[in-house]
Image (cartoon, coloured by chain):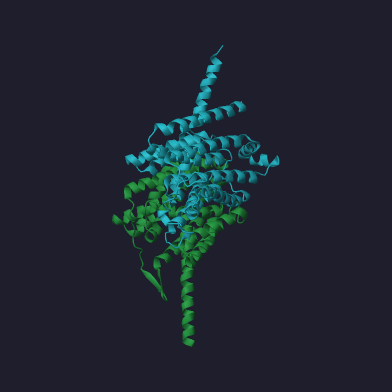
Amino acid sequence: MRALQSHVTTIGTLVAGIVLVGIVPFAVAPFTLADLTLYAAMAILAMSLGFIWGFGGILSFGQSVFFGVGGYTYAIVALNFDSPSLALLAAIAVAVTGALLLGYFIFWGRLSDVYLAVITLTISLIFFMLMNSMSSSIYRIGDVPIGGYNGIPGIPPLVVPGTDRSLSVAETYVLVVTVALLVYLGLSWLIRTKFGRILCSIKENEVRAELLGYDARLYKLAAFAVGAAIAGMAGALFAVYSGLINPDVFGIGFSAQIIVWVMLGGLGTLIGPALGAVLIQMLVVWLGKVQVIDANMALGVLFIVAVLLVPAGLVPRLQGLLAVAFGNLARSRP
Amino acid sequence: MALVLHDMNGLLMDLLAITLLEIFYGIASLALISLGLAIIFGMLRVINFAHGEFLMIGGFSFIMLTSAGVNMWIAMLIGAPLIVGLLGIVVERVVIRNLYGRIVETILATWGLSLFLMGAASLLFGYFQRGVSPPFGTLKIGNYQEGVYSIFVIVLAAAVYLSTYLVLRYTKLGLIARATMQNPEMASSLGVAREKVYAVTFFCGAALTGLAGAVLAPIAGVVPTSGLAYIARSFITVITGGATVIAGTGIASVLFGTVSQLTAILTRPVWGEAALLLTAVILLRFLPAGITGRYFRNGL
């Protein structure tokens, strides 16, 4: 069964890859491609939280911090050193370092759900306030001013390694989608390894896992760092996509969205959060266009309804329905 | 020479007095904005992420009532708490009641509520800042000026804490609330209507939050996103205080109020906020259940 599942994952990803990378770039307008790039970057971010929350039991309200830090790092390094590839690596490295530091205090303090949620939320708020307040030109790293609430504009795109040629819109799209698919495959693989199973067992019953000799703190810290690396990378890709990064990425609205993606898509799956991210991003864009109601208000209602009515999320719900349908089919056979 | 020395002394004393006043004000405002949250968390084990919006709505109710011609003190001390308290009852009925004991789900649902209220407020009131100028005028300490209203906030915070303590410790209502919190099954088998106690407790927590929002409105002003400015501070205070309502939140307020005000005076307000958080993260590393998780465990 497990082997079968693994094959389904690989084949499904391959098919999705062929469609998304091989067909879509030729079939749609560049403007739509740019939109799709954004969705893919958000899907990567969603999977990072889907992984640490769904499989590690770490409910972080600060996944957007790593995303934002990744984006800012990319911007600062790329503008200072004129080397986008180095900037991408730096974004990941800084996010991981932050996660290790924060994770040490959280996991070695053995903070429970509530405490973890509040601490991570507070950290993102602090970042939001600090970044917003750094509008004076004295706040700069290297040659790059932090820019306060205006953020950092003019972030350079990625280049083909070894040359000076920037990636086109279509190439950036292909790159980001490929990264998203690789992240999906990588995390699916990671969950099936020994590390992943131990992580899940810690989520289910931390005391039992510790009595069996596993150091829960270490495993959680590792998972947290992996999540931060992916989120940081997503942030850097987002900065590449938009050419601009501002403190809104640390805002409460954005960190709320990431949680809604995972909740609504389905906790305990990877595809669910990714789908949730794409669907809700489309919804937010649409709400912004029609301007009938405040986007925050709509998200808030969606949030409450999701918790009260579909606590398991859409993908597990669908899986459940499918399983029941197939089960009936199998049973009805003579 | 002697005169100059005396002057220097006087200046120092003035500086000391004003700094102390600022610190006390920091503690008092922190204590006020945290108490409602602490009651809801300590008694019901519910983390109310819409707490900041309750404060915001308290502020708006106060400003709307006063601009409608209601006496300022009635609007502040009765009107705003009542409105937010009633809102609290509705929220408890519709959202929280279905989620008792499921702490993560409560966090998520109340966060949704927070986004909803913020959006609703910006629709109703728009984004420009509203305010009422603080009453009482200012007090001159040497070359420094301080609003007398700050002193009122300090006195009020002390009075609110004292009366909450007295209610919880000495009245029948307080006894029933504490008993239900300690052992819900036992309490209901002795004839306590558990759901009613929860609803009343939630009302009290929300009302105190509304009061805090109204009291701080003349100083801070109110916008639909005002809640965001408060939640980080109040959550950290309550969480670090631990499950003990009065003692925990009180001690944490004193600690964080001092740290953040001193840092803010020495550098800039934003760094005060950052210092507060940093202290909390380090403190929680060593006292994961909060200050009262280890000390004062049997207090109130």
Q: Is residue B124 above or below residue A311?
A: below
Position of residue B173 measured from the top left corner of the image (x, y, whole percent): 49, 49
Q: Quadrant of the C terminus of chain B?
A: bottom right
From where the camera sits, is residue B207 visible? no
Please, which residue is most extreme toward the top here? A334
- How many marks overall? 0
Position of B214 with respect to A320 (left or right) is: left
Q: Is residue A170 above or below residue B2?
A: above
From where the camera sits, is residue A30 visible? yes
State the image quarter where residue B75 is shown.
bottom left
Please, which residue is most extreme toward the left here? B69
Q: Is residue A217 above or below residue A320?
A: below
- Which of the two residues, B76 or B172, is positioned nearer the viewer here? B76
Position of residue A104 measured from the top left corner of the image (x, y, whole percent): 61, 51
Position of residue A227 measured from the top left corner of the image (x, y, whole percent): 56, 43
Q: Is residue A140 above or below residue B20?
A: above
Which hue is chain A drawn in? cyan
Position of B283 with respect to A292 (left or right) is: right
Position of residue B203 measured from the top left corner of the image (x, y, whole percent): 44, 48
Residue at 47% x, 61% y is B28
Residue at 70% x, 41% y is A211
Q: Which chain is green?
A: B
